[in-house]
Image (cartoon, coloured by chain):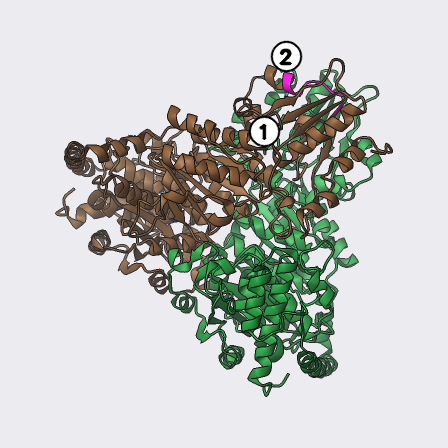
Chain colours: A brown, B green
Amino acid sequence: MPTQTTTNQLTLIANTIRGLALDAVDACNSGHPGLPLGCAEIFTVLYTQFLNHNPKNPQWVNRDRFILSAGHGSMALYASLHLAGFELPISELKAFRQLESRTPGHPELHETPGVETTTGPLGQGIATAVGMALGAKHIAARTGAPLDHHVVVLAGDGCLMEGISSEASSLAGHLQLDNLILLYDSNDICLDGPTSECFTEDVAARYRAYGWHVIQIDGHHFGEIETALNDARQRKGCPSLIICKTIIGKGSPSYAGTSEAHGKPFGKDETAATKMGLSIPTDPLFFVPDDISSLMATRLEAQAKNETTWNQHFDQWRKTHPQNAATWDALAANILSPDALFAIRSAEVKPGIATRAVSHALLQVILTHCPSVVGGSADLSCSDSTLMTAGGILTPTHYEGRNIKYGVREFAMAAAASGLAIQGMIKPFCGTFFTFSDYMKNAIRLAALMNLPVVYQFTHDSILLGEDGPTHQPIEHLAALRAMPNLTVIRPADIAETKAAWIVALTRKNPVALILTRQGVKEGLNTDIDRAQKGGYIVQSEGPGEIDYTFIATGSELNLAIESAAKLTEQGQNCRVISMPSFELFDEQTKEYQAQTLGESRQFVSIEAQSSFGWHKYIGRDGIAIAIDQFGVSAPAKDLATQFGFTVPAILARLTPGVRT
Amino acid sequence: MPTQTTTNQLTLIANTIRGLALDAVDACNSGHPGLPLGCAEIFTVLYTQFLNHNPKNPQWVNRDRFILSAGHGSMALYASLHLAGFELPISELKAFRQLESRTPGHPELHETPGVETTTGPLGQGIATAVGMALGAKHIAARTGAPLDHHVVVLAGDGCLMEGISSEASSLAGHLQLDNLILLYDSNDICLDGPTSECFTEDVAARYRAYGWHVIQIDGHHFGEIETALNDARQRKGCPSLIICKTIIGKGSPSYAGTSEAHGKPFGKDETAATKMGLSIPTDPLFFVPDDISSLMATRLEAQAKNETTWNQHFDQWRKTHPQNAATWDALAANILSPDALFAIRSAEVKPGIATRAVSHALLQVILTHCPSVVGGSADLSCSDSTLMTAGGILTPTHYEGRNIKYGVREFAMAAAASGLAIQGMIKPFCGTFFTFSDYMKNAIRLAALMNLPVVYQFTHDSILLGEDGPTHQPIEHLAALRAMPNLTVIRPADIAETKAAWIVALTRKNPVALILTRQGVKEGLNTDIDRAQKGGYIVQSEGPGEIDYTFIATGSELNLAIESAAKLTEQGQNCRVISMPSFELFDEQTKEYQAQTLGESRQFVSIEAQSSFGWHKYIGRDGIAIAIDQFGVSAPAKDLATQFGFTVPAILARLTPGVRT
């Protein structure tokens, strides 16, 4: 739609968005009318004037991305997508928040055309957008392709209060992401009342401190919104914050400007009164004036043409830059090639080192063989072993760097990694100590919910990290991640299993967490790259007859299982040892394979230097879990192994009480 | 020590701290010399000039608190505590990071006299300090007592990069906590290299944006440090940030000013070279000059006198303000009185409402009967039902308010709640939606590690919250919290069990998480306030003979267990129903009670609208877990119950496949 669209037309569109949002929220008797009413002008300008995209091809690679970080305002987005011509018919708006509709309560990736990421948990949309903007810079730098779209985020007071917005915005300022525009819906109201009761900082000054360009406007003034967005688009060398002063629930006679507008259906009377004030019909519901439909149809044509023009430009670029185009294609393929698979399988790794060090060795191979892989760490690359040495550091003057220095910002790192993954040409991994997966937890969850192929490298995986003590020693973390749907957790025991873990991580399309040791591990455990990918497999078979003890162990404790079994075998016991690097992979196997692997046994024993929580699924009610169901302490690893019973004699004493071993 | 202490003496102390830190780190061959060397002058001024405390009584209520948020620099703190006369002999410094020493790798509350909170996970020390400063303001306002100490935090670049520092500092600025002083060890180096690679924001401007007073000084200049601290102490109406420009590893010929200094032992040669440059003897190790000992002895006397003077002043105040003194004593007692217990037990609550609403009703009773209880919410009090209506809001002009508006800052809220709890006169609770416990996770962990009596009210506890969809529907959260040591998780089924949950929460000295529904729950479940406190108990006994089905359920699903059992009983099956509001409380019972309660059964069945992870401990390998091991979807609760099998017919179909129900 050209800028000559009249203010009257824009007002009509804004009020139509308001009407649609009110009707949808009333229809399902739940949802959030406050933001759609307060941001209707912003959405109008975005979807009729600003965003360079093609609703008929929501996957166009150079489209501007729009992220609603304040995901509860989803109806504003759905109404805009509908009006803009995305494949979201009015019937879907009528089915807002209903089973199997494309209009869930909060926007969800893969559910709705035009929705670029899942939002709702506040603040994370900003960090994911930072990842998307950074990803675009990286791909453009790697390939030289004319990828020049913008990422626009709309966030509210809640997002801005969340710490992750600070982490992400500080990082974006540092990385000079001038393709990032943050619209801040500043309405002075949060869920519990006026922001004067909890949020009185100077947001503009804070963002200037991060190195951002800051603009403040009247968020209901079409001209100011458009001018600010265009100013932000032109700005080079830094991201832009547009502080839009708005009135929450604008148009509602009773609730405008109050927290009452935030998250409750208005109901028939207030909705009718609101519509009347806005000069939109109260009947029929879900009303869209014909004028708008024809206006938007015109804009659709222009947008399709925009894409065509860019595609021609892109094709031209491909022809004139065949080598760069080949790089583009390699990134776009984003697969584990047979060549890469072979390189990982056959990589020579020094025996006896920590699994984090094994992973580090493999990452050097992955760097050269898997072009889509981009890593990073929350200021621990020296220790979490994530640095791909020859990959270079990603900086504002070297966006092609393969290693991202996220700083000590775990939560933003995880959400940004999701942003890197969404577009499809980057396979991101990121790392920190396993304990600090806590800081990232909800971002891992969103990656799992979106089924994004992000890899997390978590090192220092048990009390056996030693002296750093209980604040750094994970206990409950394996259970916490294993309980999360869609996440594959792998704790390899040695070189072969670490190779298997990376092969799985680089192959799967869901997020994968690699859980690695700080300390050296033993080799010679009869592990296997292929069988390990089944999640659980027999590494030491029993003799004929009934099995006395079946050990199931993971990671650095597999060795203890094998040694304990050996001792018991000497004593005439019949023992089986199962390596179980991944519960999730094992649970994906056939029931027969699972039953065959676990078998029947007089006594099941799990050995893992973490919480026992969750193990009884395999070892049963009467199984013995050699585990740690308390916090650790600060001491050398060897002393801790003794203290917490992770030695062969201590294990044998647990299994055969009263018998001297 | 009076300010006339000469610069030479101060230098000697600073360098002695450096020497002790180097020796301790070398001795155990692990730890972090960079901060102790870089902040030795700051510690010297704090412990010889500034902090108003009494090392001989580290529990003096009006002592200044010092928090080392950058907990990895623990040796600077231990060395200072030793020199200052705390009960930390040199033998403990020699046992740095060893089993059973008082000098763990990171500072731990309860382990070391003079350590005020557990730190290490970056940024949290700042938020906990905010809680402490707020707690002091609150107690002073409630009682009028002459409680006027300060809380001083030392944080590094890592802390300042973490989002929680932003949340906490924004909140502290809003709350005008002028008893809070943040020293920022700004050395331009983080673990992975120079901060220029990841952290280039203008921290001073950022803190001014939060409403803080900001001072920048040379962190190695005694005079500047002292002046800045005194300036901060005098400043009224806002917290103060002192940016101390320092050199990490200062004094080390090879590592000063580089990230090499951060976290590795220097080893014999570099330590010797460093000591020589600082004019401290290389032999013996752990050297403390006699001059320092006598200087500190003088200061000890002065400090003991300070406490005596304040105590006299306090006693005088008690005499002249008997009513206020009674309030003080009531806060200090911080117990669940028989009167309060009776009030909670006998509270009349409307049947059929959500357990969050039951809790809300109980909180109104708790407000009047439990003076130490102070609540708060991350901007959800209208929805997480945490508001104690007659308690007033805590504001800078009304610190006595019993409800804290934390804003949308879950992580800072949780860490601040720990700070509120540590001093002992406040029993804090805080609330948000259960899903967002993810944002708080590591702060809950630290509260558990410290065994602090914090209560978390988590509402909207399953997919049955309905339309808000999978981003808001907890799945793996019960497992994640149940796996955490020292945390008691309670998911009550109805009014009686919610009463039991609060009685447990107000009685125990460890953290307790209450998991509550959004939706109404049925009554008439044969629950019991007393038996529920055992964590698991039989609510419906079987008939004579072998038990066919034993149901174990929690929260809103207990009703489904009872109804399913009733149907099966009609079909001639013998059924037992166990309510299991708390795994942890049940696991604390005698083995006999546990065995008696669980009994033997042909089939165990758990019913809980969350992940099955962890349930097999009770239901065994062959138990049937009616659970949700995938993400939810956005839809009305009723539709979700059907979709995910949480109806009696669906449950019966799972139990007796092929049989029409």
Do the dots labelled 1 and 2 sit on one chain? no
- The chain containing the residue under callout 2 comes to B
Amino acid type, mark 2: Val
Q: Which residue is mark 2?
A: B659
In the figure, is residue A544 to the left or right of A95?
right
* Outermost residue toward the left in this view: A4
Residue B132's label in the rendered image is none
Whether residue A597 appears in magenta in the rendering, the answer is: yes
Q: Residue lying farthest right?
A: A658
Q: Residue furthest top?
A: B658
Tag 1: amino acid: Phe
For mark 1, does the 10 Å Cα neighbourhood hold few (<14), some (14 to 19), or many (20 or more) residues? Answer: many
x then y, percent, for residue B479: 62, 38
Position of residue B286 relative to residue A515, above or below, is below
Q: Percent x, y for residue A34? A: 38, 49
Q: Position of residue A149 (x, y in %)?
A: 24, 43
Image quarter of the N terminus of chain A: top left
Which image quarter holds the C terminus of chain A? Answer: top right
Q: Give me the disc on residue A583.
A: 1
